[in-house]
Image (cartoon, rainbow, N blue to C red):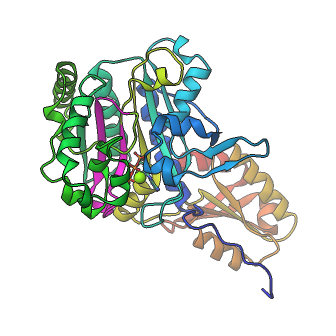
Amino acid sequence: MSGAQQYKTLKGMQDILPPDTFLWQSVEQTARSIFSVFGFQEIRLPVLESTGVFSRSIGEQTDIVEKEMYTFTDKGGRSVSLRPEGTASVVRSYVENNLHNLPSPQKFYYSGPMFRYERPQSGRFRQFYQIGVEAFADPHPRMDAEVILMLERFLSGIGLQGISFQINSIGCEQCRPGYRDALLSFFSGKADQLCPDCLRRYDRNPLRILDCKSAKCIAARSGAPRITDHLCDDCRQHFGKLQELLNMLHVAFTVNPEMVRGLDYYTRTTFEVTSQGLGSQNAVAAGGRYNRLVREFGGPDTPAIGFAVGMERVIGLLKQSAAQEWPAPAVFIAARGEPAGTEALSLAGRLRDRGLWVEVGDAENSLKSQLRRADRISARHVFIIGDEELKSGQLRWKNLHDASQGVIMMTEIEEFISGIC
Ligand code: ATP
Ligand code: MG
């Protein structure tokens, strides 16, 4: 390519190509069917929002807002950002469209690309896809249990193995301040042991240190007070009831009092799903309750809970456990010259109308090269049309999978093929 510019995807962004796209589609299909039997309905929201939608909700002093957002000024001089996650946009939409007027609880799911300017590595991209759900207006732990059960059903439905659920409660506006004080006094003598980010912002939200991945902070937080020892009665009861319900529903989980999540909007229940197969980027899905966010966006006081699944990590795990297969056409029609080529096109149309995947050979090529192509794409049945076949009205057929073959009247093909496909 003499001197021509070779374009490449941006760092941290990737093309998703067949056969992987078949796997993506099947995961998305399973999500749709499982979420809809739980009564969740799809919403599709813009990928670009006012920057405030994210900074207000996720928190000014979080990694996502401080470092990872694709923020720019648009031609009208507004600060806009590519969405780094879904919940903030869903809440913006819930309030903007008065979705609280729909029958309660209102349950939604979304799927689409998210953008974070992170250091790309295995399982970590700058454009990545999430499938997520949000359930509004039900404060009871039964909704927490139902949402977690639905996530479990989805992950097992797509065949993920070796996953575990961790749950925690990070309290509410009643009990979190007391816990925050306990953390502040625990870390007050350890400031020099914190990473620069946590040192800078720990007095605003010391829970951040518990979520920090730097080795320094992991060491410094050993022996830190546990949120589960500081919950108010209501939060403790909520968390206890959730555990009771998950046990009743046979969802296996462990309580991890250190799992606090890196976003500011959570209250009470938080949860994360990890997989042994993923190395250090081991979280496949995460979520929690956010009972104050709708009010903060100017809506009515509305409790809510949701989760988001990281698609690339799920797909990566599925690819580890099974070889990727290309789906194969049901029928390949090989035709030699004209008018056989035209007849092949017409037959293909009739079979496609019956929902069959049909490929047609290039009638200008030799029969041999057309059959080679049928073999390469693993077509199941091959029909051969040449001048003789057109005259006699009989076609030769071959089943490339079991090597059986025979002849069939052209007029009987549709019946024949629907009997065997
Ligand atoms: P992590 O701890 O891996 O950084 P997170 O806490 O930032 O995850 P969330 O914001 O809760 O993640 O997003 C939910 C899920 O989205 C994660 O569990 C993960 O599977 C996926 N995810 C998050 N960031 C990325 C990314 N940069 N690339 C690919 N997947 C991601
Ligand atoms: Mg992250």
Q: Position of residue 101 (x, y in %)?
A: 54, 11
In front of the other: 15 or 64: 64
Q: Is residue 192 left or right of residue 417?
A: left
Q: Is residue 223 above or below residue 366?
A: above
Q: Residue furthest right?
A: 338
Q: Is residue 286 magenta?
A: yes
Q: Is residue 101 above or below residue 360?
A: above
Name the residue located 45 percent from the left edge and 41 percent from the top edge. 30
Q: Which residues are magenta?
A: 266-287
Q: Residue furthest bottom?
A: 2
Q: Is residue 205 above or below residue 190?
A: above
Q: Is residue 190 above or below residue 5?
A: above
Q: Position of residue 129 (x, y in %)?
A: 52, 50
Q: Position of residue 161 (x, y in %)?
A: 28, 53
Name the residue located 57 percent from the left edge and 31 percent from the top edge. 43
Q: Is residue 412 visible?
A: no
In front of the other: 60 or 416: 60
Residue 83 sits in quarter: top right
Q: Is residue 347 magenta?
A: no
Name the residue located 71 percent from the left edge and 47 percent from the top edge. 73
